[in-house]
Image (cartoon, rainbow, N blue to C red):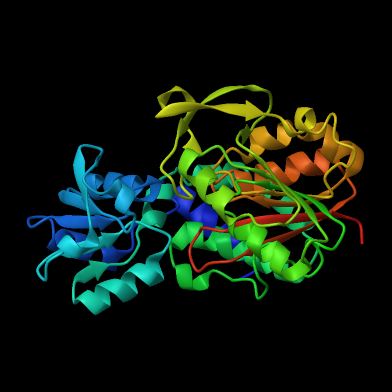
Amino acid sequence: MDLSEFRKLVEERVNKNTLYFKYGSSIRQSLDAVKNDGVVVWGASKGGERTLDVLEKQGVTVKYFVDSNPLKWNKKLRGLEVRSPSELKMGDVVVIGSVYEKEIAKELNRMGVSYLPCILSLCEFDIEGSEIYNNWKNLLTVWELLGDEESKGVFLSLLVYLIDGDASKIVVSDYKRYFHPIVSPIRGDVVVDAGAYSGDTIKEITCELGKDVVIYAFEPDEENYSKLEESVGEEDVFLVKAALWSKSMRLGFNGVGDMFSHIDGGKGKYYVNGVSLDTSFENVKKSPTLIKMDIEGAEVEALKGAKEIVKKYKPKLQVSVYHRTSHIWEIPLMLRDWVPGYRMFLGHHTQTWYDSVLYCIMGV
């Protein structure tokens, strides 16, 4: 399928006034079959909550959550108990509500417990088909901005996925996330790791480059930050317990101790410090040469807070563009306006909607 064929597909959906992501018929049939008995959701975090929302829309009763994290056991999420997976019984049906689908499925097979695959994608894209149609010019511009055929193939496959919901059509990049063949950390880089989580990306970088790189790691979640402190060894890593934002301010935060922790307006469980990258580096001798962002939908605001650094120093960028559907065109176009010389690539690193990364570098 090329771009013109894709546009025809979009027009058909819009003309029929349909949603551009449809629940797969097999999943819908499976959910119908378990409505009366109820299900258990594996994943007591943002993904689990989104899964709960879809199940409720389908009229499926959720009995309780299970999660592998013992810190969540015997607590409640959305009024439902969170239990240990060891409490699952042979007759239970589990709906996976986590991006760790393969690992969870393997464990459920070992336990002999029936399950349905991860339906997180069904939670994300209950949006009018006209959104893609109305942004056709923006999508076409992004297509033209992408620097190689591989990126264009990834881009088109993600858009097609939003139309028909078939994850098997997603093109997965053949390089490791954050290690694009051209836009990667190299020795001597000053790296910003926004959304440092437990230090997983830091470990990957230092394993590749040793101590020949400086890293500034931003992580606002209490539990994640503790894990981050424990994981950092003798590398040249500076930890900042704050969320990157467009300006310095207090932010409502939904901290759940995993990768789904996120800024949540005034609804958060507690408040965290929000800081701009421009302000954070005012008194630092070396400006960032690479900025990585995976911050659960806050990427646009965080980039606005790094605008001066981006425009002046033009660092390499690795920015997640999957947390909001519109980010796949909004973020590239914003960066194009700031730095017309950026060469852009799009990578995708899972067989679901998750983990699309925009890679930018000055013309090479």
Q: In which quarter of the image is residue 301?
A: top right
Q: Which residue is drawn at 50% across and 69% down?
A: 351
Specify the quadrant that holds the N terminus: bottom right
Does residue 170 appear in the picture of this structure? yes
- Measuring from the top left, give residue 320's x and y in whole percent: 63, 51
Front residue of this view, candidates 74 and 1: 74
Extreme residue toward the front, this view: 234
Q: From the top left corner, tell me how far across and down residue 28 is, in percent.
A: 25, 61
Which residue is drawn at the image coordinates 49% and 57% (left, top)? 162
Residues 72 and 237: in front is: 237
Q: Quadrant of the C terminus?
A: bottom right
Q: Vertical placement of 331 versus 246: above or below? A: below
Q: Give the left or right position of residue 57, taking residue 198 as reference.
A: left
Task: State the residue at coordinates (25%, 78%).
Answer: 110
248 to 123, vertically: above or below: above
Q: Going by the image, does 205 lie left or right of 298?
A: right
Residue 69 is situated, as x and y percent measured from the top left of the image, at: 34, 54
The mark total stands at 0
Q: Can residue 324 be seen in this view?
A: no
Q: Which of 332 and 78 is in front in this view?
A: 78
Image coordinates for residue 120, horizontal then vertical, percent? 38, 55
Task: Tell me where residue 274 sits by quadrant.
Answer: top right
